[in-house]
Amino acid sequence: MALTFMQMVQKARENVPGITSAEAKERIAAKPETLVIDVQDAADAGACGLIPGGVNISLGMLPIRADLELPENLRDPRLADRNRPIITTCGAGGQAALGAYILKQMGFTDVAFIDGGTAAWKQAGFEVEPLK
């Protein structure tokens, strides 16, 4: 059975915890090693801005960058530790849920997504920085 984007997001939400922007901010403060990944395409992430200290790895490239069996030049070393806390985000939260679910399926043990994405982060009054 074919799934729609929203059905895939729903399945992801059933398997990975969504957290509020405030909870994300608290987690980042409590565990500074937390990696915040904006999974939007670079143009979209650049338009929204990044959560301070966050990185942009598009949803399409995320499983490649996290795959420890691929050649080293394709991987992102920040994704080598499966126990590193990771929070995914995007514009509104749908892609972030999918990204978090992908990482969970790949063996990451401490992964969550920001419910409402970077838009909710900004609406909560938290800062963003330009995409580098």
Image (cartoon, rainbow, N blue to C red):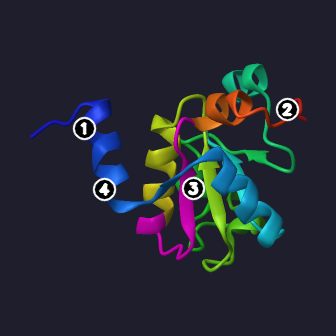
- Distance from disc 3 to disc 4, alpha carbons, whole Å, reads 23 Å
Instruction: State which tag comes first along the sequence, 1 or 2.
Output: 1
> Image point 64% across, 28% down: which residue?
119
Residue 7's mark?
A: 1
Quadrant hosting residue 52: top right
Whichever of callouts 4 and 1 sits on the residue coming sooner in the sequence is: 1
What's under tag 4, amino acid-wise?
Answer: Glu
The secondary element bearing badge 2 is classed as loop
Mark 2 surroundings within 10 Å by alpha-carbon count, few (fewer than 14), some (14 through 19), many (20 or more):
some
**Kind of residue at badge 1:** Gln
Task: Report which residue position mark 2 lands on.
Answer: 131
Query: Label 3 is placed on what type of residue?
Result: Ile
Q: Is the residue under label 1 in contact with that under label 4 (CB below 8 Å)?
A: no
**Cα gap from disc 2 to disc 4, whole angstroms:** 30 Å
The image shows residue 4 at horizontal and vertical percentages of 24, 31
Number of residues whose C-alpha sits closer than 10 Å to that of mark 4, classed few (under 14), some (14–19) or many (20 or more): few
Disc 4 to disc 1, C-alpha distance:
11 Å
Horizontally, residue 105 falls left or right of residue 116, namely: left
> Residue 110 lies in what quarter of the image?
bottom right
Q: Is residue 30 above or below residue 56?
A: below
Identify the residue under disc 4. 14
Q: Which amino acid type is marked by label 2?
A: Leu
Do tag 2 and tag 3 residues touch (Cβ < 8 Å)? Answer: no
